[in-house]
Image (tube, coloured by chain):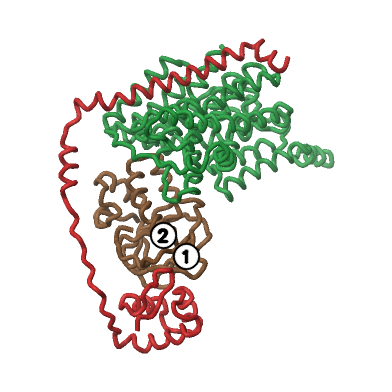
Amino acid sequence: MSTDIQTLKSLDLFSAFSNEELGFLVEIIDPLKVTEGEILTQRGTPATTFFIIISGNFMVSFKNGHAFTLHEKGNVIGWSTVVTPFNYTGTATALTDGEVLTISGDELLRIVQEDAPLAQKFMEKINKVVEERSPFVTGKIAGTSETTDNSEV
Amino acid sequence: MYGLEAISANNGWAMALLGITIVFSGLAFLSFFISRLHLFLEFWENKDERIAKLKKRFQKKPEIKKEAPVVKVPDNLQEAMAQFKMLTTRIGDPFSLPRLIEMAEMSGLFHPHSTVNKFIKAGVIEPDGKGFFTWKL
Amino acid sequence: MEDLLIQFLNNTGYAMADYRHVIMIIIGCVFIYLGIAKHYEPLLLVPIGFGILIGNVPVFHGLGLSIYENNSVLHYLYMGVTLGIYPPLIFMGIGAMTDFSTMLARPVLMLLGAAAQMGIFITFLGALALGFEPKEAASIGIIGGADGPTAIFLTAKLAPDLIGPIAIAAYSYMALVPVIQPPIMKLLTSRKERLIRMEEPREVSKREKILFPIFGILLCCFLAPAALPLLGLLFLGNLLKEAVVTERLAVAARNSIIDTVTILLGLTVGASTQADVFLTGKSVGIFILGAVSFGIATASGVIFAKIMNRFLKDKINPLLGAAGVSAVPDSARVVQIVGQEEDPSNFLLMHAMAPNISGVIGSAIGAGVLWSFMM
């Protein structure tokens, strides 16, 4: 079961996308219900799926015990699907019941080949997330807050 | 026949040189044509898109002002907070959030994930800016 | 009864197999393993690997079982390879699934796709020097184009006996793009160069995208008519995609047609690698030259990008040159990976698709040119 255009339109991640582009994306995005304590990504395993939060609260934890939490609609999890070495760098756990949208990594790669402008827009948004979160992966965390309330991520 | 002799005998040098020249000129020709194509097409393109872009540029996104959080622990969380605080005395403050949840699960506390989430939402637990979390009360 | 049993046992694969069959079956299993466990081009390696298993089950001749027997089912399927039918159909699918807009946005990157074709011609010389016949040398050289269908197409026309080893070599090296290319890319570039960020590509209009395949076929094929079967269908597929009104045909080309043809191509190419045909000294030479060809192609693209940077105001990341080999989209993905090792926020994937796609066009032109030289 795929999602609908209205849901995608309500997300900042897709704000710059046209209806036609969103129509293409709905075909490859599937909604998924998650329950409290459910693990979405496991650190070190192949990054096969990219998640966009629709509702619920999530924690992403790292090897050294570092963690940040995500609470806003539109927050994303699993950017490792588009970043080397294509393994999840953190473990994402649902803190509460919720709903996420899922895109498979292979589908993302297919978009890159089939629709470059669409992929470019998507990558630009993901780029922001990577820049924001890479300190957690590298362990070089600056003195900023990790609790991301910004729906842009 | 081997080596340079074989290449010369089979006219290899000429074929290789001419071959790469043709591939290069083919793609260079196509590249040049493409680079001019959009300029040429601009005569026919309508300008609606540009106007729309200009409009978009002047549209400012409303700034979202964040209010300073007021830390108030709901009554139903008081007891849970005491239990979780007890756990963090063993791992120190600031503490690792996944470690706290892990310990709460091991201790059999009720719904550790959502309880921790409630603490964060209520501002009882806050990130310390270095990947760990700290109690605010 | 006893004679019948002995006759049956003598006709089983167990009785007829020798060490060469075992070697080939192991190779087939490795292909399947790489495809399934390592995700190296699984859509190609799994059918090819299984085809190798099928082709190396020892059979007695006369029943029409072997791919090389005129009355066998596999032989009829293999005609799609030997007659050069499958590769153009795959090209049509590639055209129908590929967005050329990154290339249209920055056409100068097409030159990287041209530079990477140096590998084809240098290897052609190397193969001649090693004593291969000119037609064989041309077929071996095309491995450097990193384009399986093109390699099969040219080999079917020039050296049909070598289809098995050349196809296996071409697809093996395509699958090993993530292993072969990064060391060469790092060796030839400095950290500073790998950190170069590319400027955002301009927006490409629909009209440009529709006109491109029409002018592309005319410009390229008037220059190199022998590339017509491959480029003709590549551009047709792309026109079907971009024209919108032909979306149904584009969907068929990029899904059912390319999938069907890929299965048949992989299966029959794999099955053509029968031990007695495949395990020869020539095959070893082809594999070595193929690796060299691939390396040269990668290096040529990177070096050419560095040369271009001497003349360009807006520098290009020389890693993009490696994507000039036409293994779409794997070599572009490798560029992304190597670039991100230096700067995790540097996204080169989109930009790398431009030389990557022009590499497909370049290798098809290269194949056409070699074919015409040999006629």
Q: Is residue B1 left or right of residue C67?
A: right
Q: The residue tagged with tag 2: helix, strand or loop? A: helix
In the rendering, what colour is chain C? green
Co-location on one chain, circles 2 and 1: yes
Dividing the picture into quarters, in which one does residue C215 lie? top left
> Which mark is first along the chain, 1 or 2?
1
Quadrant in which the C terminus of chain C is drawn? top right
Q: Is residue C349 depicted above or below B94 in this figure?
A: above
Q: Residues within 10 Å of mark 1 (few under 14, many from 20)?
A: many
How far across and down, in percent of the image, does residue C172 sit?
60, 37
| Residue at numbered disc 2 | A133
Which residue occupies the foreground of this view, A55 or B21?
A: B21
Q: Which mark is residue A91?
A: 1
Q: The residue tagged with tag 1: helix, strand or loop? A: strand
Q: Is residue B124 depicted above or below C365 in this figure?
A: below
Q: Is residue B51 visible?
A: yes
For image coordinates 17% across by 32% down, the residue present is: B46
Q: Is residue C360 visible?
A: no
Residue type of the residue flagged with mark 2: Arg
For the residues labelled 2 and 1, the Cα–Cα distance comes to 13 Å
- Judging by colour alone, the chain drawn in brown in this rendered image is A
Q: Is residue C364 depicted above or below A122 in this figure?
A: above
Which-is-in-front pick, marks 2 and 1? 2
How far across and down, in percent of the image, does residue C130 sit?
70, 21
Q: Is residue A59 left or right of residue C289?
A: left
For image coordinates 27% across by 56% down, the residue present is: A12
- Label 2 resides on the chain identified as A
Residue type of the residue flagged with mark 1: Thr
Q: Is residue C27 depicted above or below C113 in this figure?
A: below
- Judging by colour alone, the chain drawn in red in this rendered image is B
